[in-house]
Image: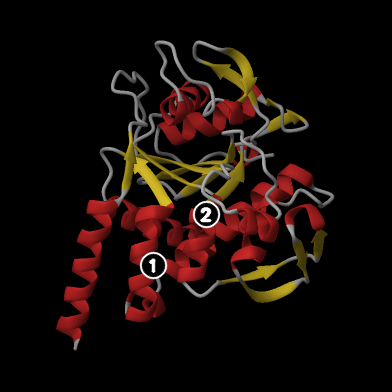
């Protein structure tokens, strides 16, 4: 039986690796240099692959923009695993386009700096000084399909939230979030902490989702593993140099966050402009593969 399960896992791994959506995200001419390993994790707000029924059910609206709703950096190395949220409204220099909100970098294309994920990576590297080693992104459709494949995600919700704009009506307490509730939970801004609370919820949910994906309950259950493997290939996109084993290492790195650090880039006014001194100390520590100082942790 164990041999059969092993063959199943290997076979599904090969299937996922050969069917992953790959795109050129990491600039070949990048001059950024840092120690350790850095993942750029992106959530796109694209509704392109949602049906009209899904848009209504999930309350996503019909926007046609290509913005990055979620931007996170995961650093692993000899220091503690660190997950850093980059506020979507951060004003930074976008190569070839001037100073704008960072979530618009993905949708700006053309020119010598490229566009889409490659321009976003250039922007993040320029703003943080860190070299991005791996890239992955997920859109609305992929998000709900992965949550559905693992049978929902277990999460302890600290406060009740009602937000019709995100189709969300959730009570406080530990519970299993289904696909629609999960998407509303990571999208909503209808709390007193607004964007800061939103990125905290996103970090907590991502950690819980990857914990569920890499748990024995999922990996040793073919009724969970098979739909998860088939959904992953269409749910996420990675850099054209990444493989399924890189995603596995990402999942296990996220499990290590229970003993690691989760934070937000320090800001000085309404999540728009970074606190240069504190943000610099945070990214300098990560570039040297060291524990960030406490006063460098945001927001």
Q: Name the spot of residue 68 as percent of width and height, x first.
A: 57, 37
Binning the other alpha carbons within 10 Å of mark 2 as few (below 14), some (14 to 19) or many (20 upward) gives: many
Determine which quarter of the picture holds residue 298.
top right
Binning the other alpha carbons within 10 Å of mark 1 as few (below 14), some (14 to 19) or many (20 upward) gives: many
Q: Name the spot of residue 17 as percent of width and height, x first.
A: 25, 54
Image side of residue 257 versus residue 34, left or right: right
Q: Coloring scheme of the render?
A: secondary structure
Q: The N terminus is located in which quarter? A: bottom left
Looking at marks 2 and 1 on the same chain, the residue that comes earlier in the sequence is marked by: 2
Residue drawn 32% across and 58% down? Answer: 248
Residue drawn 28% across and 58% down? Answer: 16
Numbered mark located on residue 228 in the image: 1
Q: The C terminus is located in which quarter? A: top right
Determine which quarter of the picture holds residue 174.
bottom right
- Asked whether residue 299 appears in the rendered view, the answer is yes
Instruction: Check the image and report above or below for 90 versus 189.
Output: above
Instruction: Check the image and report above or below for 1 versus 117.
Output: below
Q: In the depicted view, which residue is nearer to us: 83 or 235?
A: 235
Q: CA distance from mark 2 to mark 1?
A: 14 Å
Image side of residue 222 versus residue 215, left or right: left
Q: Which secondary structure lies at badge 2?
A: helix
Q: Name the spot of residue 231 as percent of width and height, x first.
A: 39, 62
Image side of residue 218 versus residue 176, left or right: left
Residue drawn 42% across and 15% down? Answer: 113
Numbered mark located on residue 141 in the image: 2
- Asked whether residue 221 appears in the rendered view, the answer is no
Of the two numbered discs 2 and 1 in the rendering, the one whose residue sits closer to the viewer = 2
Q: In the depicted view, which residue is nearer to us: 175 or 126?
A: 175
Image side of residue 278 versus residue 257, left or right: right
Q: Residue furthest front?
A: 52
Residue drawn 45% across and 57% down? Answer: 254
Instruction: Check the image and report above or below for 174 versus 1.
Output: above
């Amino acid at each position: 039986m164990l041999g059969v399960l092993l063959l199943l896992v290997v076979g599904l791994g090969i299937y996922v690796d050969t069917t992953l959506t790959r795109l050129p995200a990491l600039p070949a001419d990048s001059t950024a240099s840092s120690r350790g390993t850095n993942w750029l994790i992106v959530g796109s707000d694209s509704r392109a692959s949602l049906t009209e029924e899904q848009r209504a059910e999930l309350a996503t609206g019909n926007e046609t923009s290509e913005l990055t709703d979620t931007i996170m950096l995961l650093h692993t190395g000899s220091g503690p695993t660190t997950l850093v949220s980059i506020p979507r409204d951060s004003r930074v220099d976008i190569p070839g386009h001037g100073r704008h909100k960072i979530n618009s970098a993905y949708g700006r294309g053309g020119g010598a700096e490229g566009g889409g994920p490659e321009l976003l990576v250039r922007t993040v590297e320029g703003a943080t000084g860190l070299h991005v080693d791996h890239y992955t992104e997920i859109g609305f459709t992929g998000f709900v399909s992965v949550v559905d494949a693992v049978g929902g995600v277990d999460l302890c919700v600290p406060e009740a939230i009602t937000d019709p704009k995100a189709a969300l009506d959730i009570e406080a307490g530990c519970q299993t979030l289904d696909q629609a509730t999960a998407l509303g939970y990571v999208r909503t801004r209808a709390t007193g902490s607004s964007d800061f609370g939103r990125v905290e919820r996103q970090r907590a949910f991502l950690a819980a989702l990857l914990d569920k994906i890499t748990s024995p309950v999922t990996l040793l259950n073919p009724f969970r593993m098979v739909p998860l493997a088939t959904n992953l290939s269409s749910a996420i996109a990675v850099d054209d140099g990444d493989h399924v084993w890189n995603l596995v290492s990402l999942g296990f790195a996220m499990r290590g966050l229970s003993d690691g650090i989760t934070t937000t880039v320090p800001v000085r006014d309404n999540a728009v402009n970074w606190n240069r001194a504190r943000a610099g100390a945070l990214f300098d520590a990560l570039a040297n593969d060291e524990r960030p100082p406490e006063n460098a942790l945001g927001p």
